[in-house]
């Protein structure tokens, strides 16, 4: 089976209720493909480009500043995860956790717990132990983090890795607070440059549209740093796999045009409840200091501004 044979009419858009909506414009097409994992997506990419479509994603050029790795290697990493990437991200993650430890409130007294009260114990009070608790989580047990893979050519590979580090640290923090967390990543395109709009959703209703997303982490799964490091933190996901996948499917031709179309920002103001948008890679490259703690702080502020709970 090839990716070109999959229906792109929305029947394979499992994340449609999670992602910001795509505006419907008369006369403009919409193509959508969603995948349960990046490995599933990569396995359906053909071994060569479709006739008449750009083939740069398949070249053997291993430009580490742009592609990161060859197509063959990208397929392997999509299937198995990026172990070396996890080793690179782990020290950054440790720095963030040390600099920004999870804050837990000691709020409940019980006969068992984490911290004893000597005065209560000596007074004979059986409720002499405090239990560690974090913010209340019953209202929203699942949080979805959404990351756009789109990045201009000048976006450094280190910026991808710092975003992956911040995402992993935030997953840890939210799960410590009692939430289940899933991560969705991918891209949207428009055939019209004015349809790309901004991150706030302005002027982004023009042109033919398409999107391709995949699940990086399921809500019920533990954090697999090797898969998060690759799915969010490696440029070949966008510049190899998603470029190739889009150019392999005829339904994406109208939105991508003669190359890759124009990247559409994901508007946080239009996100469904329970879903929160991570900052764009281009924004991180331009605006944020390259220290991983500074990036983490910026991502936390971005999610808090959207009302994401559990980040106190």
Image (cartoon, helix red, strand yellow):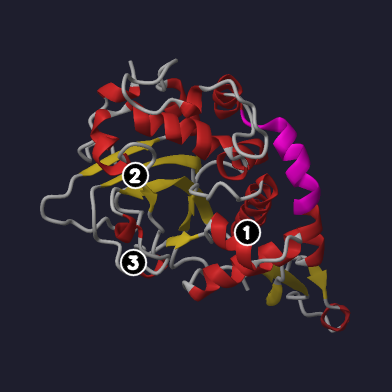
Q: Which of the 4 quarters of the picture holds residue 85?
A: top right
Task: Return the disc, 1 or 2, that comes first in the chain's sequence.
Answer: 2
Q: Which residues are magenta?
A: 81-93
Q: Secondary structure at mark 3?
A: helix
Magenta span: chief secondary structure = helix
Q: How far apart in space, not on screen, are marks 1 and 3 (Cα)?
A: 24 Å
Q: Nearer the viewer, mark 3 or mark 2?
A: 2
Separation of marks 3 and 2 at Cα, in angstroms: 16 Å
Who's the residue at 18% across and 45% down the image? Answer: 29
**Position above or below: 223 against 143:** above
| Quadrant the C terminus occupies | bottom right
Q: Which residue is more in the foreground, 172 or 226? A: 226
Secondary structure at badge 2 equals strand
Residue carrying label 2: 211
Rendered image: mark on residue 270: 3
**First along the sequence among labels 3 and 2:** 2
Q: Residues within 10 Å of mark 1 (few under 14, many from 20)?
A: many
* Mark 1 in CB contact with mark 2 (< 8 angstroms): no
Q: Mark 1 vs mark 3: which is more N-terminal?
A: 3
Could you say which is closer to the camera, residue 156 or residue 44? Answer: 156
Is 185 part of what is drawn in magenta?
A: no
SS type, badge 1: helix
Task: Please tell me whether residue 47 is drawn above or below residue 297 in the rendered image.
Answer: above
Q: Is residue 154 above or below residue 294?
A: above
The image position of residue 157, as x and y in percent, is 66, 45
Q: Identify the image quadrant of the N terminus.
A: top left
Kindly identify the residue that appears in the image at 47 percent across and 46 percent down. Answer: 185
Is 311 situated left or right of 149 in this image? Answer: right
């Amino acid at each position: 089976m090839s990716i070109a044979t999959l229906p792109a009419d929305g029947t394979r858009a499992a994340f449609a209720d999670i992602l910001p909506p795509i505006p419907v414009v008369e006369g403009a097409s919409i193509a959508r493909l969603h995948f349960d994992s990046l490995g599933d997506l990569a396995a359906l990419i053909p071994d060569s480009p479709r006739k008449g479509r750009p083939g740069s994603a398949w070249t053997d050029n291993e430009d580490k500043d742009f592609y990161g790795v060859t197509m063959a290697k990208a397929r392997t990493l999509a299937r198995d995860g990026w172990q070396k990437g996890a080793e690179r991200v782990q020290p950054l993650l440790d720095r963030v956790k040390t600099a920004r430890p999870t804050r837990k409130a000691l709020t409940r007294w019980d006969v068992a717990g984490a911290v004893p009260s000597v005065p209560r114990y000596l007074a004979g009070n059986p409720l002499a132990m405090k239990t560690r608790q974090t913010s209340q989580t019953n209202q929203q047990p699942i949080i979805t983090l959404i990351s756009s893979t789109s990045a201009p050519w000048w976006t450094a590979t280190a910026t991808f890795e710092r975003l992956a580090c911040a995402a992993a640290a935030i997953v840890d923090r939210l799960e410590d607070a009692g939430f289940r967390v899933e991560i969705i990543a991918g891209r949207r395109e428009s055939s019209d440059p004015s349809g790309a709009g901004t991150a706030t959703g302005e002027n982004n209703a023009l042109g033919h549209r398409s999107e391709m997303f995949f699940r990086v982490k399921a809500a019920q799964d533990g954090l697999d740093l090797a898969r998060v490091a690759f799915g969010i933190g490696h440029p070949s996901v966008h510049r190899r796999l998603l470029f190739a996948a889009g150019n392999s499917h005829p339904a994406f031709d109208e939105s991508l045009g003669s190359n890759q179309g124009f990247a559409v920002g994901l508007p946080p103001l239009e996100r469904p409840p329970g879903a929160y948008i991570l900052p764009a890679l281009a924004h991180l490259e331009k605006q944020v200091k390259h220290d991983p703690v500074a990036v983490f702080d910026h991502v936390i502020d971005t999610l808090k501004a959207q009302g994401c709970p559990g980040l106190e």
